[in-house]
Amino acid sequence: MRILEVREKTFSIASPIANAFIDFSKMTCSVVAVVTDVIRDGKPVVGYGFNSNGRYGQGALMRDRFIARVLEADPATLIDQANDNLDPFAIWAALMTNEKPGGHGERSVAVGTIDMAVWDAVAKIAGVPLWRLLADRYRDGRADDSVWVYAAGGYYYPGKDHGKLQDEMRGYLDRGYQVVKMKIGAVPLDEDLARIEAVLEVVGDGARLAVDANGRFDLKTALEYAKALQPHGLFWYEEAGDPLDYEIQARLAEVYDGPLATGENLFSHQDARNLLRYGGMRADRDWLQFDCALSYGLVEYLRTLDVLADLGWSARRVVPHGGHQMSLNIAAGLGLGGNESYPDVFQPFGGFADDIAVENGRVALPQSPGVGFESKAALIALMRELA
C-alpha cells in the first residue's frame, strides 16, 4: 500500500463580493488529489482535498516542499499496520519534516489541504464515511446523525441594497436554515446598524442572526459596535479585531454579555491555547471557529480539541469556519457544535450533498465512503480533472 502521486491544481473562486477586510475578486483555491495503489471497485482509491475560502491556493508551497516529502518517504513508514491503511499521522510528520516551529502562516493551508485528501483516502480504503471512521476511532462509535448548520452570507456587493440583502436572508430561511450570518465593518456603524435592522425584519429575532467583522476593528471601534449590538441579542459577534490581538477579545468579553466568536484565522493548537488563556473567551457562551483545512488538517485539529478539553472547554462550543464537507464529517464524528454553510457563494466548494436538504437548521450525513465529495456532482467533476 502506497501513495503513488499527489497532484495539485489551482482554481479561481473569484467573486465581486467583499467583507470588511478583503474582496474576493482574485481569490483562488487549491484542489489536491492523493492517488494510491489501493484498488476498490476496479479503480485506484483517490483522496481529494481543498482549502477553505479566504486563503489563496497554495500550489507553489506544495510543489516546492510538501508533496516531495511524502513521495520521497519510505512507503512502509506511512502505513497504519493496526488498521491496514495509510497513516495520516505519519504522513503529516513527513509533510512537516525540516519545518521550524511557529510561523503558522500559509504553510498551514498547504498541509491542511493535503491532509484533507489523505483522510478522504483513508476513509475510502476503510470503506466507510469519514464521520463513521472518526467516531469509531475517537468517540467509542458515537456519531451525531445530523449536524447543526447556519447560512453564511450577507457580503458587501456592488448595488446590494437592503432589499437584496433581505431577499438573500429570506432565501436561506426558505431552504431550512434557522440562523444566518452577515458581514459588518466595511461601512460606518450607523449604516451597518441599518443593514442589521433590515435583516432582523426578515429573521424576526436577534438570536437568529450572527454578525462578522472579519478582524477589521481596533479596540475603540470594536467596543463601539459592542455597545450598539448588545440590545439586539445576536447569536454571536464574530472576530471584531485582529485574530492575534487577544487583548481586544478579552476587553470585549468584559463589556459584551452576548456570545462572541473567533478562531478561524488561528492555525495551530498553540494559537488555540493562547486564545483560551489570554483572550477572555467564556466557555459557557462563546464559540470557537478553528478550520481544519486552514490549520494543518485533521491531525492538528485533534491536538487542538485536546487543548480545549484540557482547558475545560466542550467540543460542542466549536463550530468550524469553511462551510465544507470535511468539517461536517468532523462535527458529526467528533461531536462538535455544528458547521458553517455557504449555500450560495464559493461554489462548487460550499455546501453539502446534493440530495440532502437542510431541515430545521440541521443537515444529515452522506453515507458514501470518504468525505462525501462524490455526493456533490459539480464538485467531484472538478476534482476529477486531477485524477
Image: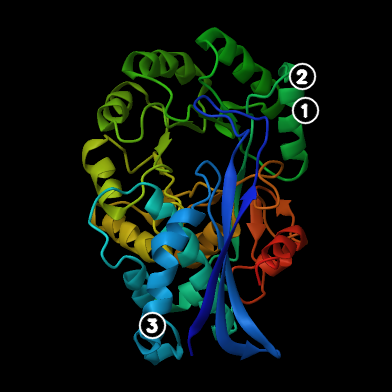
Q: Residue type at mark 3: give it.
A: Leu
Is 283 displayed left or right of 185 in the figure?
Answer: left
Mark sitting earlier along the chain (3/2): 3
Q: Are marks 1 and 2 in contact (CB under 8 Å)?
A: yes
Residue that sits furthest to the top in the current view: 190
324 to 92, vertically: above or below: above
The answer to which quarter of the image holds residue 50 is: bottom right
Circle on res. 246: none
What x and y, as percent, mark residue 361?
Answer: 65, 47
Q: How many marks?
A: 3
Which residue position is annotated with label 2? Answer: 163
As measured in the structure, the alpha-carbon distance from the residue carrying label 1 to the one carrying label 3 is 50 Å
Task: Say what secondary structure mark 2 lies in.
Answer: helix
Which residue is located at x 77 percent, y 62 percent? 377
What x and y, as percent, mark residue 271?
Answer: 28, 47
User: Are there few (<14), some (14-19), or many (20+) residues within 10 Å of tag 2?
Assistant: few
Q: Residue type at mark 1: give it.
A: Asp
User: Are there few (<14), some (14-19), or many (20+) residues within 10 Å of tag 1?
Assistant: few
Residue that sits furthest to the front in the current view: 64
Q: Residue type at mark 2: give it.
A: Gly
Task: Say what secondary structure mark 1 lies in.
Answer: helix
Which residue is located at x 77 percent, y 36 percent? 171
Mark sitting earlier along the chain (1/3): 3
Answer whether residue 295 is visible to the viewer in this image: no
Q: Quadrant of the C terminus?
A: bottom right
What x and y, as percent, mark residue 351?
Answer: 67, 52
Which residue position is annotated with label 1? Answer: 167
As measured in the structure, the alpha-carbon distance from the residue carrying label 3 to the one carrying label 2 is 54 Å
Which residue position is annotated with label 3? Answer: 78
